[in-house]
Structure formats: structure tokens, C-alpha cells
Amino acid sequence: MLTIRIFSSLLNLYVFLTYRIFEGLKKNSNFDEIEGTSVRENSKFFWFSSRLIVPLHRKPNKDKNMNPQKVIISENIGQSLTEAIAECPHDKLFVLCDETTRKLCLPVVEPFMSGYQLITIQSSDTHKTLESLSHVWSELQQGGASRHSLMINLGGGMVTDLGGFAASTFKRGIQYINIPTTLLSMVDASVGGKTGINFGGLKNEIGVFNNASSVILNTTFLKTMDEENLLSGFAEMLKHGLISDERMWAQLLHVEIEKLSAQNIADSVAVKQRIVLEDPTEKGIRKALNLGHTAGHAFESYAMKRQPVLHGYAVAWGIIVELYLSVAKTGFPVDRMRQTVQFIREHYGQLAITCKDYPELLELMHHDKKNTGGTINFTLLGGIGVIRINQTATEDEIKEALDFYREG
């Protein structure tokens, strides 16, 4: 018990110091707060090759702490992985999988890696914990990893989040590559440099911003996914459509989810990548990506104590709540809200809550990382692609939005 207490104290000290360092970096950055703007105003912001999303025009990234990140739209996983590894000189190679990706996905990439050491953790977000993180650290240490080692995270968002955090903190940081194997991790979790674990019953409570050297996106892995997990990832794509433009939003409402193309995924990733390039550490416009997440994370944490739900489902339900608030507070068109809500209800069902659960949900929202001074912050919309960050709502307004979520 004494050893565990000492370890916990040291970890808490590390997290506190990391937080203070990043706060200092943010204060010295010069990103502007951007409200009411479309993330697709500059249609020439990106061009696509068969393998790489390349920025053409963007605001200068003054954050010296964030390494550049390649996002590769891969048509040949072997070629893409071989090139990505070659760009990261290393003394030892480690591969992190969960039990599922070890069985289904590792055989796809194994021929293109040599001399690697395998680390396996348990599957599902319920194991995105300090215990799993400690296991990865221990395996790296026992495997003789140095600051010049390389880790490849092969899995969904849980693996890329936890693996990225483990790599970012072991010996003060080693290089890592993300190979997301779920739709959710392809369009969201593995891109943008957010890493972390759940802690104290709250989502992503501990973590750091640190980009992977490369993120390799290949649709081959989607063949291993069931409909429920595809829908979970699609919720983040729908969010990207809402913060982007009418064309993308309308297209997503009519796409056949089981027939998503590499171009659909590339378009979605491009929305996030544009924003992250402008604002790596979420000082301003990156908060646009939190649409649906204030309420969504509350739903997810609430369910975690009962019957866990997939992240994308919680985000979809959170979008219903936050679009209602957008109509009430920032003038979002009612017809667009109704169309989106209908799509979500038809595909994602509903989390069973009653008004008696509102105090717990509100308390969970008060713990959201976006809050300042005890005030619950939302990202809302004034229209499709018209982003309103740093919005607040009273508890009565939030309860009214939860009523709408429950009753329509």
C-alpha cells in the first residue's frame, strides 16, 4: 500500500507540473479567439495526395512544444508504415495493441516490422486507466526502452490515447506512430495530439498534448468493425459536418455508413486537422471540436458507472442537447436542428435518463475541462459552420435542453 501511495503522489506531482508548463505555453502563444467563423472559409487550406494531407495556408503555429504531425491517407499500408518507421530513427521498436487488435489487426502490419517487442493491454475504454498506463510503462522499462525508442500504437481511440500518453511521458517522451483501426480513432482520437487516460470516474482527466510523428489511416481495418462501432465513429464525422459547411453536413445525412469511402474519411480528418494546425493546445478555435462533448462526456461518465456506452453514441446524444441550446441562445436554424436530431434518434437511440438524474449530469458537466471559474462552457452554433465558442447556459436552460433530449 505504501508503494502505491508513493507512486500516486509522484504521478500527481508530475501531472501538476505538466499542467503548469502547458498553461505557460498557452499564455505565450498568440492565437486569436475566433467566434462565428466557418472552419472551411478558406477552401484552399488543404490539398490531398494519395497518402498525405498537406497544409497550404494557415496561421503560423507559434507553439514550439508541439512537433509537426503527418496524417497519411494510406492506400498501401505496408509502404506507408515502412516509410513512417524509416522517418523515425530508433534503437528499439515497441508495438502496443489491445487484445482485439492483437488478434485482428496485428497480422496485417506484422510483415512490415522487424525486431519489435509487443505490449498488450485489455480492450475497451473501461481499461483506459492508470493501471493500464503503468503496465505499458513497466513493459517499456523491462524491454530496455530508451529516449531513442519508437512505439507504434495499433488500435482504437483507447489504444492511441493511452499509448500516446505513455510514449509522451516515458523518459520524458519517446517518438510514437498511431495506426488507428476504428472509424472513431481515424477521424478523431488519433489526430490532433491529445493523449490521456480516464481518472476518478471522469473522461480523459489526465493527459498531455503531444503529436504522433505520423498517423496512418487505412480503411482496410474498418472491415473488422461491427455496425455499432462504425456508428460511434460516424458521430464525430457528423460533428465535423456541423462545424464545417452545409454541403458536408447534408452529404453525411444521406451517406451509407457501411459504405464510407477513404475520401469521406479524408474530408472529415481535414476539418479537424485544419483547426488543430491553427490552435494546437485549445486556446481558441480548437474548442469548435468540442461540439456535443460537454453534454456528451457527462452522458458517457454517467453511463460508465452503470452500463458503459460507446463514445460516439454519447457525443451524438450530446449534439442533441447542444443544438437545442444553439437554437435557444445563438440562433441556430430550427429546421437544421430537427433534421440532425431526427437522424441521431433514428441511428443512435437514446440513453435512458429521468429528471432525477439531472443533478448528477450537471455535476459531471461542472467537471468538464473546458470550464473556467466554475462556469459550464459549451461550443454552440449560429448555423452550419458558424461556430460560437465559450458559450454558457444556466442550469435551468441545461435542464430544458435535457427535457428536449428525453421527450423531443
Image (tube, helix red, strand yellow):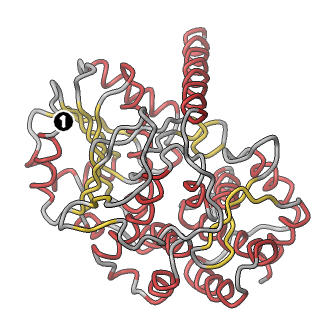
Q: Quadrant of the N terminus?
A: top right
Viewer-closest of 336 and 362: 336
Measuring from the top left, give residue 109's x and y in whole percent.
16, 51
Measuring from the top left, give residue 194's x and y in whole percent.
47, 44
Return the residue found at the far top: 2
Measuring from the top left, give residue 78's x and y in whole percent.
10, 55
Q: Residue at x 53, y 46 (%)?
A: 126
In the displayed structure, 274 sits above or below 228; it is above
**Residue position for label 1:** 88
Position of residue 357 in the picture relative to residue 94 (left or right)? right
In the displayed structure, 381 sits above or below 255; it is above
Q: Quadrant of the C terminus?
A: bottom right
Position of residue 106 in the picture relative to residue 129 (left or right)? left
In the displayed structure, 229 sits above or below 263; it is above
Position of residue 151 in the picture relative to residue 184 (left or right)? left
Viewer-closest of 56 and 264: 56
Position of residue 130 in the picture relative to residue 342 (left or right)? left
How many tags in the picture? Answer: 1
In the displayed structure, 315 sits above or below 125; it is below
Image-quadrant location for residue 22: top right
Quick one: SS at disc 1?
loop
Q: Residue at x 71, y 69 (%)?
A: 322
Image-quadrant location for residue 35: bottom right
Q: Residue at x 29, y 37 (%)?
A: 176
Image-quadrant location for residue 118: top left
Question: Label 1 sits on what residue type?
Answer: Cys
Q: Residue at x 28, y 18 (%)?
A: 142
Q: Residues within 10 Å of mark 1 (few under 14, many from 20)?
A: some
